[in-house]
Amino acid sequence: MTNEKALKVAELKSGEAGRGVARIDPEVMEILGIKVGDIVQIDGSKKTAVKVLRGGPEDANKGIIRIDGTTRRNAGTGIDERVDIKKIVAKNAEKITFAPTEQLRIQGGEDYLRQVMEGRVLSKGDKIALNVMGNKIDLVVNSFAPSGDAVMMANNTEVKINDKPAAGGGEIPQVSYDDIGGLDNEIKKIREMVELPLRHPELFKRLGVEAPKGVLLHGPPGTGKTMLAKAVAGETSSNFTYIGGPEIVSKFYGESEEKLREIFK
């Protein structure tokens, strides 16, 4: 019996996002000897680990693993890509050290983090998003003990949050398609036009096809245009730069172009 399998990544239901779980094709679970509640390591361009839930009957014999945007980002993969999985053992953590992605200080954050993350499986380098008093805070797993592929947060785990931000942690938006509701058709089009060229530029080069140079999103304020752009950046691990119109508009000839050049220097 093999202990490793390549599966196709699909979206997890939005109600299950943020729980650190994956739903796996039940036939694959049987082949690998995986049971509900077991831990598997997901190997994309990076590695992370999650708890297993049984996939629905619609996924049987399709070789599918359903994971949320946070897990996709931590595994360095995207929807419709393939990842390897294998069953691992994650011990209860004695200590876990986190670092914020930007400068901040959280009073009492350690106790809160232990409480909301109890039972979650964490790997080194994982990024997690927390909602604290309506604000979204991103943290990176710096280190943990005992050593291993992953550990599980327990009610007696010693938690430490560093004051110093993680290097390069805040450049990529921690937003995924899970954060957007009601724009399924738009997301599908965006993925075809933007995500595919960003993830697999070699396909376009091989076929001699030029990828789109830009996409125009239009609609009234508050309909999710900026959020959608951030989600694409987050799903593809790309940097995101927001530029408001008033920042670059000028009545003098050439000044708008100069301001744009300054932004992208």
Image (cartoon, rainbow, N blue to C red):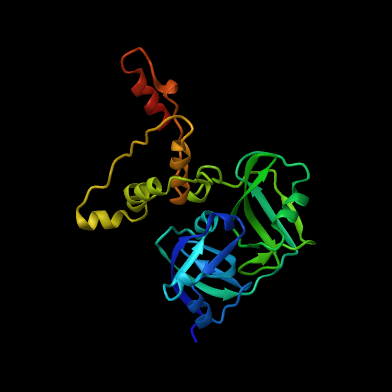
Vertical position of residue 55 compared to residue 10: above or below: below
**Would you say residue 265 is visible in this rendering?**
no
Q: Give the quarter of the image for residue 94.
A: bottom right
In the foreground, 154 or 131: 131
Q: Position of residue 222 (x, y in %)?
A: 49, 32
Q: Residue at x 70, y 63 (%)?
A: 119
Q: Quadrant of the C terminus?
A: top left
Q: Residue at x 60, y 60 (%)?
A: 20
Q: Position of residue 77 (x, y in %)?
A: 45, 59
Position of residue 24 in the picture relative to residue 82 (left or right): right
In the foreground, 24 or 4: 24
In the foreground, 38 or 159: 38
Q: Give the quarter of the image for residue 243.
A: top left
Number of marks in the rendered image:
0
Residue found at the far left of this picture:
208
**Would you say residue 107 is visible in this rendering?**
yes
Residue found at the far bottom of this picture:
1
Q: Position of residue 19 (x, y in %)?
A: 62, 58
Q: Residue at x 46, y 70 (%)?
A: 59
Q: Position of residue 93 (x, y in %)?
A: 72, 65
In the foreground, 131 or 203: 131
Position of residue 80 in the picture relative to residue 129 (left or right): left
